[in-house]
Image (spheres, helix red, strand yellow):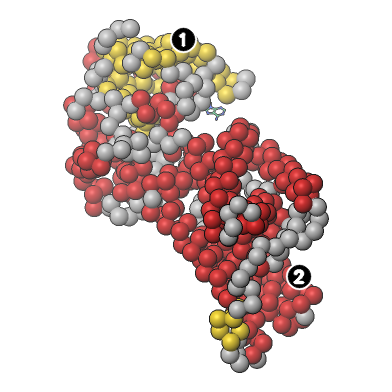
């Protein structure tokens, strides 16, 4: 029983992190109908940046993360502005191929520079438990991951729902021509949206890099997690992303509890399949695309 | 450039792929007037407006605004110059409140004070919107949607307002009410282009009219000098042989 409670708690905490990993994918799809195949690889690229910068000139994780967010936003702007925007008029498939190409390039460049070894970002919280009772142990690291992720989701929710930029993003998402008729340059809005998505993904990359470690090809596994989260929660919904993350996290850890750790990923995706069968558009899908 | 003319369309040709929808359209929209473009289903009215607004690129020809060539310019940049459109079928943002829709209309407005003024004017023109201000646009009636689309377009404080079939699917009383508001807006100094299928109302609410049949201008003139019968003959006559 203790282990069951522990699995649920850890699952929820892990799910928060999963949500931060998935929300950028969801945002980009909700706004421009594009599945960003490079989402996971860009996330891991951010992990590498945080690692190098925190070891080197920056000295610690926070300034390294801030610098990484700036770098990733620039990468996002260039990728969207110079490449994806150009092909997006021709439909979603060419744009999807561009992101696929990006994923491959990032992986190979990382492989060339860093090889195939596992890396990790130094983490002072790794062995600190903030709660330690008979029922459950909550590691400081998992708690921080969860809280930072929820903070990212809340900030994003505020941005989308309460700011002028967010309103223009919602307008572009729901009706491109009407948004242009309001004076919104929707191509520029897409650039902002991609930057925001990569910023959230980079925070996810930093957290993952501290907790699990990573190597040049880790991006694809995280892309799959992001997919899972987004498919369960519903594309384009921030709240849905959180729900999707928590459901995926809890079902994975309960899967490990009942059937052993070897099948936890499998159980996670079986849950996904069940939900997808019952609710093909995900649990909460609210950014309707036309 | 002719001082009194706000917008011109010169020898415009447009279509979709191999299909030609507009042939050599030339029109002038004088400052301060209401000009109507009358045409039946599929005449090419929306195609023309989309070409003007940069939604679709014309095959050839030219659109000018205040003497400047704006052919093929990005829609949002044309809006920034002072042209605004209430599109066919209103296209309100259904997942936003009425108030948020209006704020979207003022997207390019930086001044808070001006924004407040424009909001006040919108609600003054369409009191029905004020009552619904907090509601999602999805819950509005057809007439209210059309009002919102017009009010939203006006939030940018435009020099030229274009309305594409604002009477579509609405009861005649509602349409007349909205038309009277268009007259008010015109009274504020906004030049207006009205696109409609219905001959009589278009003639009575505009200063000058163009009749569009199968992608061609077949008749034009000062609205109260055109007879409804002549316009209708032109309108249906050509269709008969097509
Ligand atoms: N997206 C499109 N692709 C192909 N053909 C189109 C498209 N839109 C319109 N057409 C065709 O172009 C012609 C002109 O259409 P348009 O929509 O401009 O007419 P309209 O005068 O606005 O008609 P309505 O009164 O029905 O709105 C029609 O023959 C129509 O079938
Ligand atoms: Mg039309």
Name the residue rendered at 32%, 43% in the picture. Answer: B102
Q: Is residue B107 above or below residue B191?
A: below
Viewer-side residue, A226 vs A281: A226
Asked if residue B6 shows in the view, the reply is yes
Viewer-side residue, B236 vs A39: A39
Name the residue rendered at 50%, 53% in the picture. Answer: A287
* Residue A112 on image: x %, y %: 79, 46
What is the number of the mark on residue A267? none
Check the residue under mark 1 and report the chain it is in. Answer: B
Kindly report the distance in space between the C-alpha atoms of the residues bearing marks 2 and 1: 64 Å
Q: Residues within 10 Å of mark 2 (few under 14, many from 20)?
A: some
| Relative side of B136 to B21, left or right | left
* Residue A87 on image: x %, y %: 63, 34
Name the residue rendered at 74%, 74% in the picture. Answer: A264
State whether discs 2 and 1 lie on one chain.
Answer: no
Asked if residue B196 shows in the view, the reply is no
**Would you identify the image quadrant in which residue A65 lies?**
bottom right
Name the residue rendered at 47%, 27% in the picture. Answer: B74
| Relative side of B125 to A47, left or right | left
* Residue B141 on image: x %, y %: 34, 48
Q: Are marks 2 and 1 in contact (CB under 8 Å)?
A: no
Residue with the mark numbered 2: A266
- Assign a secondary structure to mark 1: strand
Q: Quadrant of the N terminus of chain A?
A: bottom right
Residue with the mark numbered 1: B11
Viewer-side residue, B6 vs A251: A251
**Would you identify the image quadrant in which residue B170 lies?**
top left
Q: Residues within 10 Å of mark 1 (few under 14, many from 20)?
A: some
Which of labels 2 and 1 is toward the front? 2
Viewer-side residue, B143 vs A62: A62
């Amino acid at each position: 029983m203790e282990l069951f409670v522990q699995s649920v708690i850890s699952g929820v905490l892990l799910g928060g992190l999963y949500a931060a990993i998935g929300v950028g994918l969801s945002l980009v799809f909700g706004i421009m109908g594009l599945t960003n195949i490079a989402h996971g690889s860009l996330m891991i690229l951010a992990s590498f940046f945080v690692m190098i910068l925190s070891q080197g000139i920056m000295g610690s994780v926070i300034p390294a993360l801030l610098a990484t967010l700036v770098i990733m936003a620039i990468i996002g702007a260039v990728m969207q502005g110079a490449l994806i925007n150009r092909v997006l008029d021709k439909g979603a498939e060419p744009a999807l191929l561009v992101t696929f190409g990006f994923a491959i390039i990032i992986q190979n460049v990382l492989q060339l520079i860093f090889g195939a070894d596992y890396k990790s970002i130094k983490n002072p919280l790794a062995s600190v438990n903030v709660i330690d009772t008979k029922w459950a142990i909550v590691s400081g690291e998992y708690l921080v991951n969860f809280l930072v992720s929820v903070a990212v989701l809340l900030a994003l929710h505020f941005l989308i729902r309460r700011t002028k930029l967010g309103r223009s993003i919602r307008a572009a998402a729901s009706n491109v021509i009407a948004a242009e008729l309001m004076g919104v340059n929707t191509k520029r809005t897409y650039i902002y949206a991609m930057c925001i998505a990569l910023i959230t993904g980079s925070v996810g990359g930093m957290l993952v890099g501290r907790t699990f470690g990573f190597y040049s090809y880790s991006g694809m596994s995280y892309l799959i997690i992001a997919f899972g989260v987004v498919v369960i929660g519903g594309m384009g919904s921030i709240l849905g992303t959180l729900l999707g993350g928590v459901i995926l996290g809890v079902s994975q850890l309960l899967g490990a509890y009942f059937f052993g750790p070897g099948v936890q990923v499998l159980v996670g995706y079986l849950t996904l399949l069940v939900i997808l069968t019952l609710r093909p558009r995900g649990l909460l899908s609210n950014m309707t695309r036309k | 450039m002719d001082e009194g003319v706000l917008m011109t369309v010169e020898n415009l040709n447009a279509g979709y792929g191999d299909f030609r929808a507009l042939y050599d359209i030339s029109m002038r929209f004088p400052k301060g007037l209401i000009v109507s473009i009358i045409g039946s289903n599929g005449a090419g009215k929306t195609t023309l407006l989309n070409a003007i607004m940069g939604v679709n690129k014309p095959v050839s020809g030219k659109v000018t605004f205040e003497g400047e060539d704006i052919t093929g310019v990005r829609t949002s940049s044309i809006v920034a110059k002072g042209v605004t459109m209430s599109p066919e079928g209103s296209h309100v943002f259904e997942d936003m409140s009425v108030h948020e829709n209006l704020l979207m209309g003022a997207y390019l407005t930086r001044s808070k004070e001006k924004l407040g003024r424009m909001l006040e004017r919108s609600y003054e023109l369409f009191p029905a919107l004020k009552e619904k201000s907090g509601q999602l646009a999805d819950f509005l009636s057809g007439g209210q949607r059309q009002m919102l689309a017009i009010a939203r377009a006006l939030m940018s404080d435009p020099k030229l307002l274009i309305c594409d079939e604002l009477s579509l699917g609405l009861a005649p009383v509602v349409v007349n009410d909205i038309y009277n508001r268009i007259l008010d807006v015109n009274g504020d100094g906004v030049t207006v282009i009205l696109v409609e299928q219905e001959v009589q109302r278009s003639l009575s609410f505009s200063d000058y009219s163009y009749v569009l049949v199968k992608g061609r201008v077949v008749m034009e003139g000062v609205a109260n000098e055109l007879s409804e019968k002549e316009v209708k003959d032109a309108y249906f006559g050509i269709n008969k042989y097509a």
